[in-house]
Amino acid sequence: MSSKKEEYKSRIRIKIKAYDYKLADQSSIQIINTAMKFGANAVGPIPLPTSIKKYTVLKSTFVHKDSRDQFEMRVHKRLIDIAEPNSKVIDALMNLNLPVGVDISIKYLN
């Protein structure tokens, strides 16, 4: 593990969150292709655990407690590391057009 940290002195960590797994995969492929085009090494996408939020709602307002609807929201997450980024890679990532419904957080790690 320590050899990897010594090998890559600077890197960018990108976390992708989306409600649809297809959008998460599509945007991660787009980010990796952009990084590779400008000569940076990309590691990933690494799928992180999907977080599931479940909601139970009564169908009736007052009576019929036994009849309920259940809904769930799934948030799919991916992780991408870009090693040894240059200024062109950072500019290209900032100007990237991604689909609606995809949340991205970018961290610069030393």
Image (cartoon, rainbow, N blue to C red):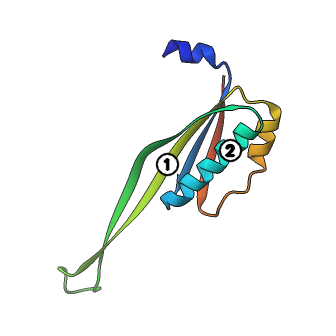
Looking at the rendered structure, the secondary structure element under dot 2 is helix
**Side of 107 relative to 88 (left or right):** left
Looking at the rendered structure, the secondary structure element under dot 1 is strand
Quadrant hosting residue 54: bottom left
Name the foreground residue: 79 vs 73: 79
Separation of residues labelled 1 and 2 (CA atoms): 19 Å
From the image, tell me which residue sits under label 1: 77
Locate residue 99, reporting x and y percent.
Answer: 65, 61
Is tag 1's residue or tag 2's residue first in the polypeptide sequence? 2
Quadrant hosting residue 102: bottom right
Residue kind at label 2, given as amino acid type: Asn
Name the foreground residue: 62 vs 87: 87
Residue kind at label 1, given as amino acid type: Lys
Q: Which label was assigned to residue 33? A: 2
Judge depth for marks 1 and 2 and give the one in front.
2
Image: 59 above or below 78: below
Residue occupying image coordinates x 78% and y 50%: 95
Residue occupying image coordinates x 19% and y 85%: 64
Callouts 1 and 2 close, C-beta under 8 Å: no
Locate residue 87, reporting x and y percent.
Answer: 82, 33
The quadrant of the image that shows the C terminus is top right
Number of numbered markers: 2
Locate residue 45, reporting x and y percent.
Answer: 54, 41
Alpha-carbon neighbours of circle 2 within 10 Å: few (<14), some, or many (≥20)? few
Locate residue 5, reporting x and y percent.
Answer: 57, 17
**Side of 43 relative to 19 (left or right):** right
Residue occupying image coordinates x 37% and y 59%: 53
